[in-house]
Image: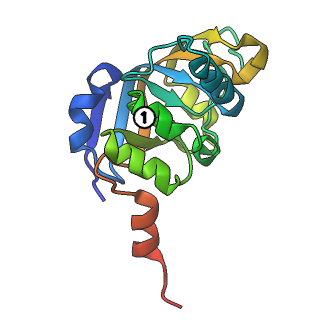
Amino acid sequence: MESEIISANVSELASVLPQMRAGGRVLLSGEIYTARDAAHVRLMQLIDDGKDPPFDIRGAVIYYAGPTPGNGERPIGSCGPTTSSRMDAFTPRLHDMGLLATIGKGDRSLAVIDSITRNSAVYLCAVGGAGALVSKHITAAEEIAFLDLGCESIKRLTIDSMPLTVGIDCSGGDIFKIGRERYLVPG
């Protein structure tokens, strides 16, 4: 596992993906989008109906989060990751449409790992249970779609040096597999 920290802007993420390795650390800045379960269902329905999604999927980063409202001092409240596997049914299709990265917590299915490698994408992990800390790296937030979903609406976030760990790299390196192999005590 790598210990080097890569600082990257979303706009240049594709060029630094080959340097990222499972277990490596990333400080990500730029524009990302939030979407959870209900938003993914609606997003897929729009696409199935031949309509444009509310943001350009190509080169985008989706953060699996349902942030709470801001308090006046901050543009957003707590913004921790949700379990990524709940979006596994949708993720390969989005990767095939050009989605560059997802951010969440927990491991992913083999279909998602295959789509990550096939599309030279990446899966980044945010620390679960640290939503208040993560929100300190969010400088702007705007609801852009499915407002009736409340905290699960799609939001455009501007982030500054959000601390993340590479969960699955573009060559298929998987921190969850590596960790199990490295730390599992033979029985």
Query: x and y percent of residue 124 in the render?
Result: 44, 41
- In what element is the residue under mark 1? helix
Taking 72 as reference, is 13 above or below it? Answer: below
Quarter of the image where the C terminus is located: bottom right
Which residue appears at 25% of the width and 47% of the height? 4
Q: Tell how many labels.
A: 1
Which residue appears at 38% of the width and 31% of the height? 100
Disc 1: which residue: 95
Q: Decide if residue 184 is on the left or right side of residue 43.
A: left
Asked if residue 121 can be seen in this view, the reply is yes
Give residue 12's quadrant in the image: top left
Query: x and y percent of residue 181 in the render?
Result: 41, 74
Which residue appears at 57% of the width and 37% of the height? 90
> Residue placed farthest to the bottom in the image?
187
Query: x and y percent of residue 115 in the render?
Result: 41, 44
Asked if residue 166 can be seen in this view, the reply is no
Query: x and y percent of residue 52 in the render?
Result: 53, 11
Q: Decide if residue 173 is on the left or right side of residue 33.
A: left
